[in-house]
Amino acid sequence: MENEVDPQVLAVINEKRLSGPRLTPVEIVAKMGVFDAREKPFDHAWLATGDNVIATIWAEWVNVGAGGRWFCLESLDIHHRAGGGERNAQQVQRGKDRLALLKRTFDAGQGFRAVVQTNRLAIVEVESNKDAKVSTRVRDDDEWHVASWEPEQKLAVLVRGPRGWVPTEAEVQTARARSNVPQQLAAAAGAADGAASKASPEEVRAAAIAYVVKHFTGYGYKAENLADKNIGYDLEVSNAKGQTLLRVVVKGTAPGVPSFKLSEEESACSVREPLWRLLVVTDAGSPTAQHKIYKPTEINSAPGHDPS
């Protein structure tokens, strides 16, 4: 609700609202280059033309730091609502899609465009009350960016304006008290996720393989797990007709496990096997896991690869 918004933020929203044409929340996003905006009215982030990422920023969560810089905290916990309780399947998927797009900009060192909005009801009800809808949405002409991404804390910091400024630790702690970080997560101070960040290389690799198997089978391919056979690759991927398409070595990175090595057999297989590929899963085991496939000639460019 507007009475939950910092006065400085609300003043900017009102100025933009009054100075621009009267558009619906969907029309605003559509005019920013999201052609399927009407099909995704409840999404919280979109990929627009030119591979531009657009994300919603709830004004109620925006904090004003030193020098008037705006920032907000982004929870990396996709399973729990800010107001308490677990998200349903649709809410989880929307959260996962949003984080994937934000992580994409972070990894690429790019900014994202934002629509700043207020909610009709108390902001903590945004996902639990069917009447909690957008009250006001405006296009922000200033670019935002992901200033930090901390999987071990399940927290990212989004900042409005040029890079080079980040909120102080005191400002972040103050923001936690009124942010969309689920209270059980803030209270736990990352205890459960601290255990996850200490996962062993074997656990990270297992999570990476499970991710890749799910990825390929989701597209209708068969992914046979041969990891325990020590034949130079982990998965053999084939189509519905039984034709082998790829022989994949799977490696994963995660907090606490930043690098990986290829075994002698894997390196040898990369030379003799034309279907051999390296597939690296970053943030393995987390909701924001992503992957990329590398040819044998591209191995040294793979993030986390230790050639020693």
Image (cartoon, rainbow, N blue to C red):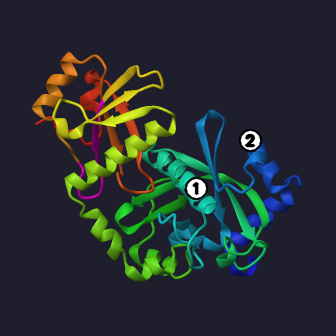
226 over 173 or under it: above or below? above
Q: Nearer the viewer, residue 20 or 146?
A: 146
203 sits left or right of 61 in the view: left
Q: Quadrant of residue 188?
A: bottom left
The answer to whether residue 184 of the structure is visible from this angle is: yes
- Taking the spot 67% from the left edge, 69% from the top edge, the residue there is 59
The residue labelled by disc 2 is 36
Q: Nearer the viewer, residue 66 or 117?
A: 117
Mark number displayed over residue 281? none
- Magenta-colored stretch includes residue 122: no
- Taking the spot 30% from the left edge, 70% from the top edge, the residue there is 194
The residue labelled by disc 1 is 93
Question: At numbered mark 2, what does the secondary structure look like: helix, strand or loop?
Answer: loop
Query: Which quadrant is home to the C terminus?
Result: top left
Crowding at mark 2 (Cα within 10 Å: few <14, some 14-19, many 20+)? some
Amino acid identity at mark 1: Gln
Q: Quadrant of residue 150?
A: bottom left
Crowding at mark 1 (Cα within 10 Å: few <14, some 14-19, many 20+)? some
140 over 245 or under it: above or below? below
Amino acid identity at mark 2: Asp
198 sits left or right of 307 in the view: right
- Tell which tag, 2 or 1, sits nearer the viewer: 1
Q: Residue 33, image x and y in percent?
A: 72, 39
Q: Residue 156, image x and y in percent?
A: 46, 62
Q: What span is in magenta?
A: 248-258
Question: At numbered mark 1, what does the secondary structure look like: helix, strand or loop?
Answer: helix
Contact, mark 2 vs mark 1 (Cβ under 8 Å): no
Q: Residue 134, image x and y in percent?
A: 77, 65
286 over 273 or under it: above or below? below
Gap in Å between the C-alphas at discs 2 and 1?
Answer: 17 Å
Q: Residue 290, image x and y in percent?
A: 42, 45
